[in-house]
Image (cartoon, rainbow, N blue to C red):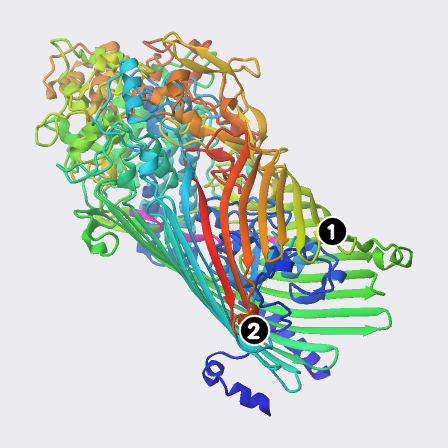
């Protein structure tokens, strides 16, 4: 009974939290020198969804990125750690952290309504990307990415857009250990927009005989808003255990001051995992607790920030007007504001996550395990914003809070047996999930002083009716899953999943969705005729087909006709709130369905010093949820959420791992992954319940903003049926033509021969796509004795970027109210018609980071310090591109209003330098 | 082990049965229709009052006036009254405003489509309200719902009036469950007759109260509002009854008859009769022209139908002053501005701007030359020079010219609410949709068209603003309508009625084939035609 006595060692821990985790085969060890190697194709146990298998007998498209493959350099979030490491997983890097959160795509965009974010599962708990980003990267043991429906089908409707499973580190049955990981770095701008300096500004105005407002200063506003960024991370973890009890606990903090003033992020995390086995290891109890608090200081309206900084009159001072005590503004330039005044806007977010989960597993006999899992997550996001009177007439404060409670419970029975050449795993699961989403917000205006900020809303006099509100939503999901995995002779693998999901969001008649999948694998290398081939270590062919469902990001109640407050009117002389129908309801709403076919090949040669993985997939989304245009009349509103259209995605993913050099003192590893993606919007129209519904032939996705760009023909990226999602549909510019006053205009071609007309369907053509056709991620690492060096290179190809920034800043028509770029006065363009003139090739290769590390030989100290590593990194080294704008790394993956358009909102390009220290006792 | 399997099986079964209940939605922040009509007070609120939320608006194309790119803009910036000139980087907006002014709005114009959808939204919601009221009336015969029914029918007629005026041939949809195959266009005359019939049927059940006074009927469609609308319909009936407007001659109002009460009157007599009804109801010209547009204009004896405005209570905005005034002019008020809309050369000429005989209303309607803040101090530009609006320098594209930012006489018509919020877009001046001076001018015009003398009504209007009398000729009446009703959104309809909409004027050439009058109605938007293949395009587009 020494086990019992062991548990008494830390009664407090046991009292507070219980037990710990199952199948924890991971290593607590930090980056060790010989592990910079692709680690697939081993007989390593891997957890895929609810099931546990091994890499060898896997038949779906699954990629596991363990700690060794995660990004080094200065990494502050899990998404940064994963970026570029897995083919088909795109994560936009760059400075905009908020954008990064919504930029993750597994095999592209497959739904128009939303739900394109991959499902995130953290230690079995369903979460989202925002929850993932609160985890400290050093707490993560591995990412497992399920790409094709044959594996994502386990998650049914939630997994339609791919699944990122995150396993966090657990304790190990070993003696007590403490480890520390820390980084410190600085970040500085190395490329910014080149606008006219104050002197040039004056000279150009003189030359053009234009009257300017000259306040006599020399201010470089794009530079004024920046600073030296400072970043640091610290993380301490300790853990230990016996054969029956394990624990691990960690705390971490991250602090990041970005290169643009007023933009900073902080994150504090704490995490505990416990595991207890009992009754001759037949019973196991795992528990995890996780808490985090993020504090974010955002730049409100990045476009306004950078647009204002670039174009604000450079003769204005970089300080407040000492006479008035406020910032000088340029009234003629109505679309911008004094950038330094704008930086005084407070836009803060505090985001608290809490999760606890527990799992009981009982080994009923040699073959049968029963488990119950329960999880509770609580998330509170508080947003506070204050727009001071200098930038907003009378000031405005906003305060809002969104709370999410997420309860998940499941029961699972799994059976595993091996007899003769047969191996069988069967699993049955029932699961329910309930979310409660509540929140409120209020907006207050008419402040007489900025002193209170958003901290005392009573300082504002006016609370408008539409500025205050609250909501309640409680979507639910119930599911059943059966999974079957059969291996014959270690050569033939068959996996089948069947999942049924029911959601409260769907109309009653279509509530249940059935999502089956199957996959096969043939391990050729185990066949007799290949066993003798000495250079071949592994050869496996895989094929799978599956159906998954998606409800996208639709809200509750879409299938019900409900009344909501729709405004205040005078009733009997008193202001009164009335109720009204505010959208068309669709009682026939059903699941969007995605069918995926996948074939793949895994191969390893020369003692796995050459590893190859290749996949081809084809996915078709049908019954696509979309806010279709419907005819008004008979409908009251012009949009109806319905299931109608279809879209096709296909692609090839290649992964290559080479170890050309492998000696005791030296090792070179090269890992390259390339993904080719193709997307086509097949249809967005048809008959639905006797009504013809469609999307317009040309639906703008991204448009230009700013002075003179409101409305009209300033749409750049479109959704066009028959094309890839997000294509540039633009007038063709044949060149610049000189005007009577010596200035130039963009000459627009009359493509359809009936006079120049910039409208959709007239003189416009599809000029390219906004999403890359190919994505590259590559890592080169070299070790010499205790030193190692690692270089990550990412790239994207085959897409275009619209340089709206240049279109705006090269337009002398906006001078002198708006400053222009160096070079604009010579070119003398006085036009901002959006044509293909500024459509540029978006191809780039980016040197993401370079890290040099030294695993300090400890000699005699090894008794006390197990491990010590020093490292230094440079992040965002350089970018090779033909693109003329600031950076080609804009939003080229997410279908939203910024897709493919570089429009005055880019962060200056910064490089960071950091040093890191890891040690373990 | 078997026991556990059984346990799992049973619990799954239990779960499955519990599922359907578990998966039911129980909305808490919205209510079902049954709950919305539980008391007579709520019936009024959620069938009738709810529709008044759409009369005004706060976003593009929503609301009858006060917002951008909607009914008002289509009636104003397409005419010789006003324009939104391109000012360098400002107001080009993809050629939208120039397109309106030049009548090159295209068949795929988003603003035109959004206006169509806005008008039909209110119509479909009105249909829904009518159906609910009819059902409830059957359920609760003791409730007195007929005034509600009449009011909703009148609201629906009002929206059909704007539709037929802008688009000509439109589908008459009278039920919220009209199947798609029944949504077909009616001839313009058919829609017109429907509107007149509906209003006449509704009249007796509508209250006689004034709508512009705060009180029980504030902002509502009451009988005087319907009188005004009927007068408008009759005055324009030659246009509305003209079904082949690009190929045939217009019918003659003298031979178009309406049943008014128990009399049969021709179009002009009908107009006069409904205008007289307003006089009988006690509508008068306000002593001062500007009283009707003051911050607190709810007491106006002249205003007939307004959009109630209250910066603290209602979301309705009035963006017309905001978008017109220069940035520094706005800043001097502590408000916002967008330096846009301006009077055209024709308007300046009509007002006699710059002559000795300038109309007194010019100063009431337009900012020109030097302007002042609330303290009487001159408004200056950022560089310290005096801001001076240059009315005669107006042209459609001002980019690069010295007067780029300052050309044009600006909108002044509504008193500036110094306490206005949202940059001054939220203010307390009620937006005037219908006004008695218009009724007088309608009557004058109807008389002249009927071969009678309309001098007295015309000159009643002119006397109030201290202008010398004029002979009531059609020419003078059209000019007077521009003088009196500047910035009130009537110019397009007036020009169409007078057959002048398609003519050439300064900086606007006539389009090819435009003399046939095809631009007098807007095209049915392409996207509307795509979604309902039974609809056909208006002639000429």
Question: For residue A240, what is the image quadrant?
Answer: bottom right
- The percent position of residue B128, horizontal first and vertical second, equals 43, 45
Question: Could you tell me which secondary element the residue under label 2 belongs to?
Answer: loop
- The percent position of residue B506, horizontal first and vertical second, equals 32, 9
> Mark 1 vs mark 2: same chain?
yes
Q: Is residue B528 visible?
A: no
Residue identifier under label 2: A171
Q: Is residue A143 magenta?
A: no
Q: Nearer the viewer, residue A829 or B532?
A: A829
Residue identifier under label 1: A611
Question: Could you tell me which secondary element the residue under label 1 belongs to?
Answer: strand
Callout count: 2
Left or right, B6 with reference to B90: right
Q: Nearer the viewer, residue A222 or A236?
A: A236
Most distant residue in the left direction: B376
Question: Which chain hosts label 1?
Answer: A
**Tag 2 or tag 1, which sits nearer the N-term?**
2
For label 2, count other residues whose C-alpha is less than 10 Å away and answer few (under 14), some (14-19) or many (20+): many
**Magenta span:** A550-568
- The percent position of residue B341, horizontal first and vertical second, equals 28, 23
Question: For residue B433, what is the image quadrant?
Answer: top left
Q: CA distance from mark 1 to mark 2?
A: 31 Å
Q: Nearer the viewer, residue B339 or A360?
A: A360
For label 1, count other residues whose C-alpha is less than 10 Å away and answer few (under 14), some (14-19) or many (20+): many
Relative to B241, say whether A244 is above or below. below
Residue A110 is labelled as none
Which quadrant is home to the N terminus of chain B? bottom right
Left or right, A439 with reference to A117: left
Left or right, A602 with reference to B293: right
Question: Which chain hosts label 2?
Answer: A
């Amino acid at each position: 009974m020494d086990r019992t006595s062991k548990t008494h060692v830390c009664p407090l821990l046991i009292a507070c939290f219980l037990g710990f985790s199952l199948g924890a085969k991971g290593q607590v060890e930090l980056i060790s020198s010989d592990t910079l190697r692709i680690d697939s194709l081993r007989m390593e146990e891997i957890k895929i969804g609810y099931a546990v298998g091994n890499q060898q007998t896997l038949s779906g498209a699954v990629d596991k990125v363990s700690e060794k493959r995660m990004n080094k350099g200065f990494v502050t979030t899990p998404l940064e750690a994963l970026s570029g490491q897995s083919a088909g997983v795109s994560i936009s890097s760059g400075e905009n952290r908020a954008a990064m959160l919504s930029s993750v795509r597994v095999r592209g965009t497959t739904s128009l309504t939303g739900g394109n974010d991959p499902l995130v599962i953290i230690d079995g708990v369903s979460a989202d990307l925002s929850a993932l980003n609160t985890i400290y990267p050093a707490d993560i043991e591995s990412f497992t990415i399920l790409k094709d429906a044959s594996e994502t089908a386990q998650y049914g409707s939630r997994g339609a857009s791919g699944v990122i499973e995150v396993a966090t580190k657990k304790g190990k049955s070993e003696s007590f250990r403490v480890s520390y990981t820390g980084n410190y770095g600085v970040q500085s701008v190395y490329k910014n927009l080149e606008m006219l300096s104050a002197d040039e500004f004056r000279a150009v105005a003189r030359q053009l005989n234009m009257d300017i407002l000259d306040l006599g200063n020399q201010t470089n506003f794009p530079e004024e808003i920046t600073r030296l960024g400072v970043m640091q991370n610290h993380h301490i973890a300790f853990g230990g255990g016996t054969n029956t009890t394990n624990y691990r606990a960690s705390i971490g903090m991250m602090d990041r001051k970005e290169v643009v003033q007023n933009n900073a992020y902080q994150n504090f995390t704490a995490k505990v995992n416990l595991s207890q086995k009992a009754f001759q290891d037949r019973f196991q109890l795992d528990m995890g607790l996780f808490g985090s608090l993020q504090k974010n200081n955002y730049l409100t309206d990045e476009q306004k920030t950078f647009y204002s900084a670039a174009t604000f009159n450079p003769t204005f001072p970089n300080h407040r007007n000492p006479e008035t005590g406020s910032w000088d503004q340029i009234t003629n330039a109505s679309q911008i504001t004094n950038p330094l005044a704008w930086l005084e806007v407070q836009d803060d977010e505090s985001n608290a996550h809490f999760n606890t989960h527990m799992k009981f597993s009982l080994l009923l006999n040699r073959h049968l395990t029963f488990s119950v899992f329960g999880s509770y997550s609580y998330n509170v996001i508080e947003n506070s914003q204050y727009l001071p009177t200098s930038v907003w007439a009378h000031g405005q404060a906003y305060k809002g809070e969104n709370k999410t409670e997420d309860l998940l419970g499941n029961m699972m029975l799994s059976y595993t047996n091996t007899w003769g050449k047969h191996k069988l795993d069967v699993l049955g699961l029932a699961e329910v999930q309930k979310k409660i989403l509540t929140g409120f917000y209020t907006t207050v205006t008419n402040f007489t002083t900025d002193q209170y900020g958003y901290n005392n809303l009573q300082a504002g006099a006016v609370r408008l009716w539409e500025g205050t509100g609250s909501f309640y939503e409680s979507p639910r999901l119930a599911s059943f899953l059966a999974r079957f995995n059969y291996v014959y002779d270690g050569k033939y693998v068959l996996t089948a999943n069947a999942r049924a999901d029911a959601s409260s969001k769907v109309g009653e008649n279509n509530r249940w969705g059935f999502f089956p999948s199957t996959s096969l694998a043939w391990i050729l290398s185990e066949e007799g005729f290949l066993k003798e081939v000495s250079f071949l270590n592994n050869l496996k062919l895989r094929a799978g087909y599956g159906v998954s469902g998606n409800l996208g990001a639709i809200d509750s109640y879409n299938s019900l006709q409900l009344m909501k407050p729709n405004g205040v009117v005078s009733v009997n002389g008193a202001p009164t709130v009335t109720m009204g129908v505010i959208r068309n309801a669709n009682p026939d709403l059903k699941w969007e369905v995605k069918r995926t076919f996948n074939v793949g090949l895994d191969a390893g040669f020369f003692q796995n010093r050459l590893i190859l993985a290749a996949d081809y997939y084809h996915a078709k989304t049908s019954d696509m949820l979309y806010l279709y245009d419907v005819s008004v009349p008979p409908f009251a509103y012009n949009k109806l959420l319905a299931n109608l259209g279809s879209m096709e995605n296909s692609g090839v993913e290649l992964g290559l791992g080479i170890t050309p050099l492998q000696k005791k003192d030296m090792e070179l590893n090269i890992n390259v992954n390339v993904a080719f993606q193709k997307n086509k919007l097949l249809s967005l129209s048809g008959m639905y319940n006797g009504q013809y519904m469609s999307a317009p032939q040309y639906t703008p996705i991204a448009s230009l903003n700013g002075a003179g760009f409101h409305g009209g023909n300033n749409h750049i990226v479109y959704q066009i049926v028959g094309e890839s999602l997000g294509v540039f549909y633009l007038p063709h510019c044949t060149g610049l033509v000189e005007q009577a006053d010596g200035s130039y205009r963009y000459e627009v071609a009359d493509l359809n021969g009936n006079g120049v007309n910039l409208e959709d369907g007239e003189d416009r053509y599809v000029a390219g796509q906004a999403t890359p056709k190919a994505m590259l991620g590559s890592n080169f690492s070299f070790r010499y004795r205790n030193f190692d060096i690692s270089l990550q290179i990412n790239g994207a190809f085959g897409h275009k970027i619209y340089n709206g920034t240049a279109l705006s800043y090269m337009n002398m028509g906006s001078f002198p109210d708006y400053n222009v770029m160096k070079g604009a006065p010579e070119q003398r363009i006085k036009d901002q018609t959006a044509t293909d003139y500024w459509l540029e090739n978006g191809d780039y290769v980016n040197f993401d980071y370079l890290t040099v590390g030294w695993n300090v030989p400890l000699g005699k100290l090894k008794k006390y310090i197990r491990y010590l590593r020093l490292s230094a990194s440079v992040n965002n080294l350089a970018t090779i591109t033909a693109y003329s704008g600031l950076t080609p790394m804009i939003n080229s993956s997410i279908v939203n209003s910024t897709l493919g358009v570089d429009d005055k909102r880019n962060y200056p390009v910064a490089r960071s330098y950091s040093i890191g220290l890891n040690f373990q006792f | 082990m078997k026991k556990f399997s059984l346990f799992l099986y049973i619990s799954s079964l239990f779960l499955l049965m519990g599922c359907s209940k578990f998966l039911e939605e129980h909305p808490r922040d919205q209510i079902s229709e049954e709950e919305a009509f539980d008391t007579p007070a709520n019936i009024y609120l959620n069938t009738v009052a709810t529709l008044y939320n759409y009369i005004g608006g706060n976003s593009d194309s929503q609301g009858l006036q006060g917002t951008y790119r909607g009914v008002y803009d289509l009636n104003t910036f397409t005419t010789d009254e006003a324009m939104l000139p391109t000012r360098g980087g400002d107001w080009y907006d993809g050629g939208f405003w120039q397109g309106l002014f030049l009548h090159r709005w295209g068949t795929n114009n988003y603003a035109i489509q959004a206006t169509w959808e806005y008008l039909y939204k209110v119509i479909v919601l009105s249909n829904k309200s009518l159906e609910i009221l009819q059902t409830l009336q059957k359920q609760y015969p003791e409730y007195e719902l007929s005034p509600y029914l009449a009011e909703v029918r009148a609201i629906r007629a009002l929206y059909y009036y704007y539709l037929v005026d802008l688009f000509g041939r439109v589908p008459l949809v009278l039920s919220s469950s009209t199947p798609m195959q029944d949504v077909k266009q009616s001839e313009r005359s058919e829609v017109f007759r429907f509107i007149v019939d509906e209003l006449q049927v509704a009249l007796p059940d509508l209250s006689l109260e004034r709508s512009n006074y705060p009180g029980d009927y504030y902002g509502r469609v009451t009988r005087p509002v319907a009188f005004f609308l009927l007068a408008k319909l009759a005055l324009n009936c030659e246009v509305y009854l003209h079904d082949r407007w690009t190929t045939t001659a217009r019918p003659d109002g003298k031979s178009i008859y309406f049943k008014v009460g128990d009399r049969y009157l021709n179009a002009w007599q009908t107009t006069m009769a409904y205008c007289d009804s307003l006089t009988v109801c006690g509508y008068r010209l306000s002593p001062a022209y500007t009283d009707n547009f003051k911050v607190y204009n709810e007491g106006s004896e002249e205003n007939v139908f307004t959009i109630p405005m209250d910066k603290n209570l209602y979301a309705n905005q009035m963006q017309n002053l905001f978008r017109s005034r220069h940035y520094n002019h706005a800043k001097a008020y502590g408000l916002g501005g967008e330096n846009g809309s301006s009077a055209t050369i024709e308007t300046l000429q009509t007002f006699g701007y710059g002559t000795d005989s300038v109309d007194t209303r010019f100063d009431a309607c337009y900012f020109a030359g030097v302007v002042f803040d609330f303290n009487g101090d001159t408004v200056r530009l950022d560089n310290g020079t005096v801001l001076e609006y240059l009315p005669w320098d107006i042209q459609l594209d001002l980019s690069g010219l010295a007067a780029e930012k300052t050309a044009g006489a600006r909108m002044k018509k509504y008193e500036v609410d110094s306490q206005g919020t949202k940059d001054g877009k939220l203010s307390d001046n009620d937006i005037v949709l219908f006004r008695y001076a218009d009724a007088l001018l309608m009557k004058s015009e109807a008389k002249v068209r009927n071969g009678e003398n309309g001098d007295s009504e015309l000159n009643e209007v002119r006397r109030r603003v201290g202008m010398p009398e004029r002979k009531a000729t059609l020419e003078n009446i059209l000019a007077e309508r521009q003088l009196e009703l500047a910035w009130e959104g009537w110019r397009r309809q007036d020009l169409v009625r007078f057959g002048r909409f398609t003519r050439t004027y300064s900086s606007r050439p006539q389009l090819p084939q435009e003399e046939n009058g095809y631009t007098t109605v807007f095209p049915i938007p392409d996207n509307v035609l795509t979604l309902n293949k039974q609809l056909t395009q208006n002639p000429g587009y």
